[in-house]
Amino acid sequence: MPTHSLEIAGLTLDRGSKRVVDSFDLSLAPGEYCVVLGPSGCGKSTLLHGIAGLISVARGSITIDGTDVTHEAARKRNVGLLFQHDTMYPHLTVQQTLQIAAQANPTRNLSATQLDQQIRVISETMNLDPGWLPRRPDTLSGGQRRRVALAKTLIRNPSVCLLDEPMAAIDRLASERLMERLADVSNQAESTTFVHVTHDGEEAMRLADKIVVMSEGQILQVGSPGEIYRSPNSSEVALALGSPSCNLLSLREVIRACPQIGEVIELPDGQSLNELVLLLRPETIQLLEPASDQNNASTATESGEWQFPAIVLERRNLGGRTLLRLQPISNENAPPLSVTIAESWIPAKTGTRWIFQTPISKLRVVAGSPQHTNSPAI
Ligand SMILES: Nc1ncnc2c1ncn2[C@@H]1O[C@H](COP(=O)(O)OP(=O)(O)OP(=O)(O)O)[C@@H](O)[C@H]1O
């Protein structure tokens, strides 16, 4: 019995003369839900098309349920693929679409009764209204069509289910519902392994057992959502998760302004301060008290807090949370910091000076280049 339902080793894929996926490694256990997170054009769809067998492999291997399928035809792989854009036949009803999809699994032969049963089960799972079955896809809304397309992908009971931006082009509420459905489906389908690609960090955090952060065809980091969020290995990974985006500060400048930080913070071996940035998540910063005109210095307290004065440049109510943009007083030319406070009303008005603080234990040092640094100093 194979321990991994999907095993990818050194997978390299080209589009024309361009190398789009380079030396990609991934091992997923049966039932695992993996989200590949990366910006537009980094090679996510190409990766899925390679796993599905729609494009040939330049190098490396793909193993599904213990069988090497690297050079196997797409129809012989037990893989379901939800394309980024609708691919339903316009002249077929939803019922006919689901019937054809259910029969496409090369490993089973369904009777008419079993087919009806499968359509009933998937309709319940994906919350498809029975009234949609005799309808054609162009009579459904975008969100409804997406659910049908997902049902079509899942009904063949694939070993590996590949989802290309499943929430694309649907509104927030519909995408919330679809995420709930997906979470239910992946919990129920214990043997189906999911690879879901997106550029949306929140989607990745909500659904994934494992996140793969990808950039320019290569893996930057693999880990659980908690690991990637708490301990990103680079500024690029840090920026992939969290909304608003994390603040990245020049570590050298922070230590210059507050030398105690340099004494207590853990630095990776062998890297110079210029290659490192300080990661400060907006939700870890607290509003402490009004600052006087004499409060200009940033300090570290004995209880392990880092305190700094800043001017509130902008205040926005996010409904239950407040987003602030701050100008640290010690560097008026620095780009503003983002802060989210978990209250809808706070006393800090635009243009006023306040002391902010964050636990030093929550600060993370990551490798980063200056262009990923959005705030040079506090
Ligand atoms: N059929 C093709 N022929 C040539 N180049 C292609 C082809 N398909 C994709 N590419 C190129 O490969 C790169 C990766 O494209 P891909 O669609 O895999 O990225 P992606 O991460 O899925 O992007 P998005 O999130 O925008 O869908 C891009 O530079 C794209 O222009």
Image (cartoon, grey):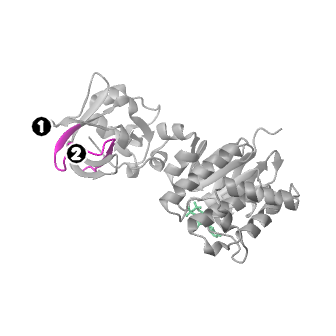
Tell which circle, 1 or 2, labels the residue nearer the N-terminal end: 1
Mark 1: which amino acid? Ser
Q: Which residue is mark 2?
A: 331
Q: Position of residue 331 (x, y in %)?
A: 22, 45
From what the image shows, is residue 104 above or below residue 135? above
From what the image shows, is residue 144 above or below residue 246? below
Mark 2: which amino acid? Asn
Q: CA distance from mark 1 to mark 2?
A: 17 Å
Q: Nearer the viewer, residue 254 or 202?
A: 202
| Number of marks in picture | 2
What's the magenta bit mostly, secondary-structure-wise?
loop
Residue at the outermost front position: 131
Q: Position of residue 356 (x, y in %)?
A: 25, 37
Mark yes or no: residue 50 visible: no
Q: Position of residue 133 (x, y in %)?
A: 70, 67
Quarter of the figure that contains the N terminus:
top right
Q: Quadrant of residue 190?
A: top right
Mark yes or no: residue 87 visible: yes
**Residue 354 on the magenta segment:** yes
Q: Which residue is mark 1?
A: 292
Q: Pointers 1 and 2 in contact (CB under 8 A)? A: no
**Ligand 1 appears in which quadrant?**
bottom right
- State which region is magenta: 333-355
SS class of the residue under badge 2? loop
Residue at the outermost top position: 302
